[in-house]
Image (spheres, grey):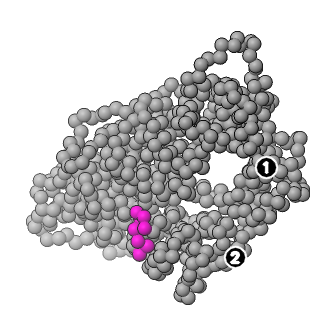
Amino acid sequence: MSDTFTTRVEQPGGPVHAGSGDFYSYTVNVGLGDQEAPGRSPRRIADDQLRLLRQQFVDPAGMGMARRVLGCSSTVILHGAPGSGRTAAACVLLYEVHQGAGIFRELLPGEEEGALTDPGLVGVGDRLLLNLAEADVSQWAQTRRDLSALRQAVQEQQAHLVVVMPYDGALESHLQPYRADIARPPDIEVFRRHLRLHRIPHEEYLLPAPALDEFLAEQPPMEEIAHFADRVRRARAAFPARDGFATWCKQSRDARTQWRNEVAELVATQCAAPQRALLFATAMLHGMHADVIHRGAALLLSTLNTPRDETPLLEGKDLAQRLTEICAAAGPDGRVRFDKLDYDAAVRAHFWDHMPDLRHLFSTWTAQSTELNDPHINSDLRKRLVSRLADQYLRTGRGNDLAFLAEEWSAAPTSRDRLEAAVDTLACGLHDTRYGQSLRMLVYSWCRDKQLTGNLAHVLLRACTDVIAPTHPDQAVTRLHHLARRERGATPALDALCRLVATSARLRRRMLDRLTRHSAAPTVDARLFLRICDPVALTDPAGAPRPLIDEKGVQDCAVAGWAEALARLPQPHWQPYAEQWLHTACTADSHRDRLLALLVDAAGRNGSTLAALYSAARAAEPTAPGGRASGAATTQRLLQKISTAQGLRPPAAPTPPAPPRGTTR
């Protein structure tokens, strides 16, 4: 745990910033080895999240109709009361129509994705969620006007769209055929589904439980039922032999309502700093080993500069006695827990709410605690600790402050554990439904303009790939593009951007357009273009009716991008990419002429540039797929197109396709 992350300047002879505005050069080293293993793809993350949701889901009334409408028309408009699980139902519907092509994502009209009428908004096989449950009258009216154009694009791209409409929203007659009404599923079935997933035997949860009946009579939101079931699970795990199902449900109910007053009385009676430090540490590190609790309490006293207790160690109270005084104890496994369910949450809330002057020090202590070198601490426990702190920020309306906390924790020098804690802190805010949108905008601003000191670039990169990309890939692409523009030396953001656009032809198309038609930094974007404009990806249809290279818009982007690269970058930089392009032409028979023509068109009539292209082709011959002869044939074809471009010979006829086996010309 002594490993550190540093920022260092590499390649001091690198590019010169010749434009206006600030310029920041940074390199983020995010591993102990030379290469950090790439994480799971955003598509895999999204699919895993949807799969878990499907396992937890109980079909509401009307779900069958929703499936039929979506299957027949590729669009369904869900209507249901708040708390009925509308959003979960929409996500499950989209998970069930999963196909090989396309990605899941949430559309956000009015944000960066643009208008719903944009034909480029929908990719082949995409699964689109348009959640307008909280939309106002004007936003819902605009969406209804745009829905026909969006539906047409969805059908053309063999995609699927689920719209969650406002509960009191109007719907015109021509949209009524796509409407499906869902009703709240049986609360008891939702509760039992969660218990089954927690592997609790049915003979236990089928017993009567008055506290459960009282809770369900309130008709709580589906999310609250899930939380109640989780508390029952934890009560059962903490007291498996002493109590039964009815008692576990009673503890789950009481944890919602009664503990705050009891905690206030306990804190009032425990006035000594060491005991309050132990109480806070036990709440934050709840369920961890007693050794960790003890060290955490001592660390808090040190963080607060509390004078050391001079009582001889053998004369003082031992840890077991001190834990008993705060209603906690260590179990047979050495892990410390309070004797009441969710009492730890009430303690955390009390300290945060009633000791506001200590909040920043509590945050500092949390960061320091993630770095404790103890065999009883692992990455999951560190994530849990960070999440408990983030909950206090979110609960008290300070969700945006989590970004600034992550920035503070990522300042150099920092350890791997603290840097991971910074990533987790920002992720907690981005996942929150109240603060996700504003934090995504803050991340955008930082990726584009903020001075990226310390390891903040790594935190932003992880936020984009791990949190934003699975549900808002277009926004992740934009943010990664800004990060990639500022990289010098190592290119983790560009690598992540390439992996993200590889998940969707639509994302690659939009990125090529962004790099070539709307570039604010053409020289830097020319470098990025060479990575994004992968000829293999352009010629592979990947389940779509046709490959990207057959699209006129993509061809225009390829010519414009290559023209900038050939004009602005030195030949040693673009030549390896040109060789890859030529090697692809060797094997892509049906696209060979188009690939070569795009390169020649990019060079224009510039003789020196055309000569450099020919030189690159000759250099690529020995390593061409199929051997030198295949490479030489491609070079000859390129030379014919160069000669035509210079007016030295008439255009060459395209190479006819090879005849089917068993036939003659």
Q: CA distance from mark 2 to mark 1?
A: 34 Å
- In percent of width and height, residue 281 lies at 66, 32
Towards the viewer: 470 or 504: 470
Towards the viewer: 273 or 580: 273
Q: Is the residue marked by circle 2 packed among few (<14), some (14-19), or many (20+) residues within 10 Å?
A: some
- In percent of width and height, residue 432 lies at 56, 54
Residue type, mark 1 in image: Asp
Residue appearing at x 63%, y 24% in the figure? 298
Please identify the dominant SS of the magenta region: loop
Q: Is residue 95 above or below residue 621?
A: below
* Residue 625, magenta (yes or no): no
Q: Is residue 46 left or right of residue 628?
A: right
Viewer can see residue 387: no
The part of the image, by quadrant, that contains residue 88 is bottom right
* Residue 111, magenta (yes or no): yes
Residue receiving disc 2:
62
Tell me, for residue 542, which label it has, or none: none
The part of the image, by quadrant, that contains residue 318 is top right
Mark 1: which secondary structure? helix
Question: Which badge, 2 or 1, is on the more N-terminal residue?
Answer: 2
Q: Which residues are magenta?
A: 110-117
Residue receiving disc 1:
254
Quadrant including the C terminus: bottom left
Q: Is the residue marked by circle 1 packed among few (<14), some (14-19), or many (20+) residues within 10 Å?
A: some
The part of the image, by quadrant, that contains residue 342 is top right
